Image: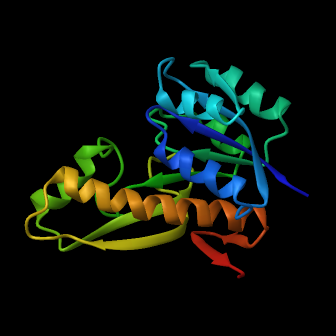
Amino acid sequence: MLKNIAVLVSGGGTNLQSIIDATEAGEINGQIKVVISNKENAYGLERARKHNIEAVFENDEKKVIEILKEKEIDIVVMAGYLKIISADFVNEFKNRMINIHPSLIPSFCGKGYYGKKVHQGVLDYGAKVTGATVHFVTEGADEGPIIMQESVKVEQDDDADTLAARVLKVEHQILKKSVALLCDDKVRVDGRRVYINE
């Protein structure tokens, strides 16, 4: 039985594209039923339309929740969704909503850490390793239980753009793998710990 997936985006949607590609290749036992953006001109919506996936611009959280319920969504993926969501939204999809963050949480995350600011923060601190994290969404920004992480070495000549490009490749890999595991019911949450039954 295919799981119903919704993807929430605010921008270009390269992480969305990685999930689209993986579902079309049969790597994910699920189907993307809808892509929703809080930005009307987000290129992620165009990516969805190119693959005949319903694309919706909606900024009202209550309406977003209504759409997700109406589509009988099993898994919600926040892929570059730059909007803080309410406790009601979180509770509605507890342990069924995931997010990708471009650092190794708990470093360089939380309020104010998004996009290029994350990678600049890594460089300014002088960290030697960064990476990406897929985690469940909770009320606190980037505070949910961690599903998967992958590290990326910081090179001496990196700037925020070169580092972001390498981290993004890792994001694509671990996000689609996490979605696949959730679709196969191979993820169990116990408090802050996440167990994967591969």
The quarter of the picture where residue 85 lies is top right
Tally of marks: 0
Measured from the top left, where is residue 104 in percent x and y? 36, 66
Measured from the top left, where is residue 42 in percent x and y? 47, 26
| Residue visible at 71% across and 70% down in the picture | 187
Task: State whether residue 182 is above or below residue 194.
Answer: above
Task: Tell which residue pokes out farthest to the right in this image.
Answer: 1
Measured from the top left, where is residue 193 in percent x and y? 59, 74
Q: Give the position of the N terminus as an image quadrant.
A: bottom right
The quarter of the picture where residue 156 lies is bottom left
- 156 and 74: which one is in front? 156
Inspect this view and state whether residue 95 appears: no
Inspect this view and state whether residue 62 appears: yes
Q: Give the position of the C terminus as an image quadrant.
A: bottom right
- 186 and 95: which one is in front? 186
| Residue visible at 18% across and 74% down in the picture | 128
Task: State whether residue 173 is above or below residue 3.
Answer: below
- 17 and 150: which one is in front? 17
Measured from the top left, where is residue 105 in percent x and y? 38, 63
| Residue visible at 52% across and 45% down in the picture | 79
**Is 6 on the left-hand or right-hand side of 113?**
right
| Colour scheme of the rendered structure | rainbow
